[in-house]
Amino acid sequence: MSLVGTYHLKYYIHASHAIRWENGEGEEHAHSWEIAVEFRSTNENMIVFDKIESSLDDLFKAYSGKFLNTVEPFTTIDPTLENITKFFFTLVEKQILPMHAQLNKIELGESPMRFYYVTRDDMSGE
């Protein structure tokens, strides 16, 4: 049996959005978004949390307090729970790869009972 260890970090941002429907944009409403990222080392070494933690904290702070519909890429892409999660997956993956970390999963919650997950399709990272 082979064991694989992963790291898990959690962040919170406060931001609003409005869904675009066929007949126009819905009401702007705010959420306290919960973001959880799960990653593993790409080089079999222990990862130093501080560097990744502070890097991701800075990344997510850029979206806190914002109306997401006015922030790229959500000026053209509907800021749904699903689209925001996929966008954050791409951002986080790019941010942590140089730190020898591979993103396995990201989960985004817009309420304590409503979450969306995005996972890596190929867990080998190739």
Image (cartoon, helix red, strand yellow):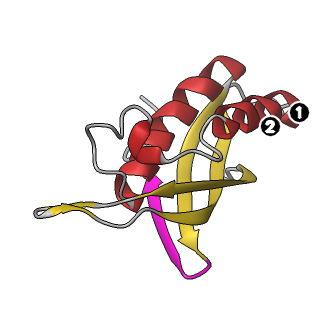
Q: Residue at x 40, y 31 (%)?
A: 72
Q: Is residue 56 magenta?
A: no
Q: Residues within 10 Å of mark 2 (few under 14, many from 20)?
A: some
Amino acid type at mark 1: Asp
Q: Residue at x 88, y 33 (%)?
A: 50
Amino acid type at mark 2: Glu
Which is nearer the eye, 37 or 102?
Answer: 37
Image x and y of residue 89, in percent: 48, 42
Q: Which residue is mark 1?
A: 50
Does residue 117 appear in the picture of this structure?
Answer: yes
Q: Are marks 2 and 1 in contact (CB under 8 Å)?
A: yes
Q: CA distance from mark 2 to mark 1?
A: 5 Å
Which stretch is magenta? 112-118
Is residue 95 left or right of 114 when viewed as pictured? right
Is residue 36 left or right of 53 when viewed as pictured? left
Relative vertical location of residue 69 with respect to residue 16 in this rendering, above or below: above
Q: Residue at x 11, y 64 (%)?
A: 23
Q: Residue at x 53, y 25 (%)?
A: 94
Q: Which residue is mark 2?
A: 53
Image quadrant occupied by the C terminus: top left
Relative vertical location of residue 73 with respect to residue 8 in this rendering, above or below: above
Image x and y of residue 48, in percent: 87, 31
Image quadrant occupied by the N terminus: bottom right
Which is nearer the eye, 114 or 66?
Answer: 66
